């Protein structure tokens, strides 16, 4: 929740308080913060004594967080694209046939 609030404050600050001349500096600041975030996550994981024991568990959890949303997205896109495209083709065919009469 804190992350979401900070992100919203950043959006508001970027929208109303920063001009285009700060765009390069802002990009550099974003890169530095991202590198620090990744480094701190690595330090946190490296401090754990049983890191290699939980590595498999982390990998499996990450795979599940990737696999389920991806599968559901593919199924929904397939279903809706077939349904919407079939409806559109039917309407276009009906419109074409009515124009001939």
Image: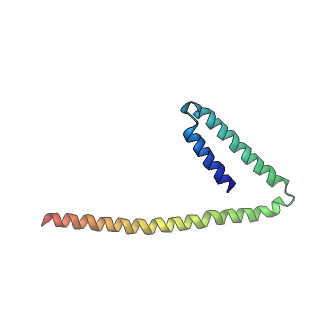
- Colouring convention used in this rendered image of the protein: rainbow
Residue 99 in the image, given as x and y percentages of width and height? 16, 63
Residue 85 in the image, given as x and y percentages of width and height? 36, 65
Q: Say which quadrant the C terminus sits in.
A: bottom left
State whether residue 21 is above or below residue 84: above
Q: In this view, does 51 lie to the left or right of 94?
A: right
**Mark count:** 0
Q: Which residue lies furthest to the left in this view?
A: 101
- What's the residue at 60%, 41% (across, down)? 13
Q: Residue furthest top?
A: 21
Residue 11 in the image, given as x and y percentages of width and height? 58, 45
| Camera-nearest residue between 63 and 69 | 69
Q: Say which quadrant the N terminus sits in.
A: bottom right
| Camera-nearest residue between 26 and 70 | 26
Q: Is residue 42 left or right of residue 68?
A: right
State whether residue 17 is above or below residue 92: above
- What's the residue at 80%, 49% (across, down)? 43
| Camera-nearest residue between 52 and 66 | 66
- What's the residue at 69%, 54% (across, down)? 2
- What's the residue at 56%, 64% (across, down)? 70
State whether residue 34 is above or below residue 72: above
Residue 34 in the image, given as x and y percentages of width and height? 68, 44
Picture quadrant where residue 78 is located: bottom left
């Amino acid at each position: 929740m804190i992350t979401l609030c900070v992100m919203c404050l950043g959006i508001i600050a970027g929208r109303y308080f920063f001009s285009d001349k700060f765009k390069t500096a802002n990009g550099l600041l974003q890169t530095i913060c991202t590198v620090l975030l990744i480094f701190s996550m690595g330090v946190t994981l490296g401090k754990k004594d049983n890191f290699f024991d939980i590595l498999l568990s982390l990998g499996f959890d990450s795979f599940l967080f990737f696999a389920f949303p991806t599968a559901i997205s593919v199924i929904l896109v397939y279903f809706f694209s077939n349904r919407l495209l079939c409806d559109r083709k039917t309407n276009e065919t009906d419109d074409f046939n009515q124009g001939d009469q």
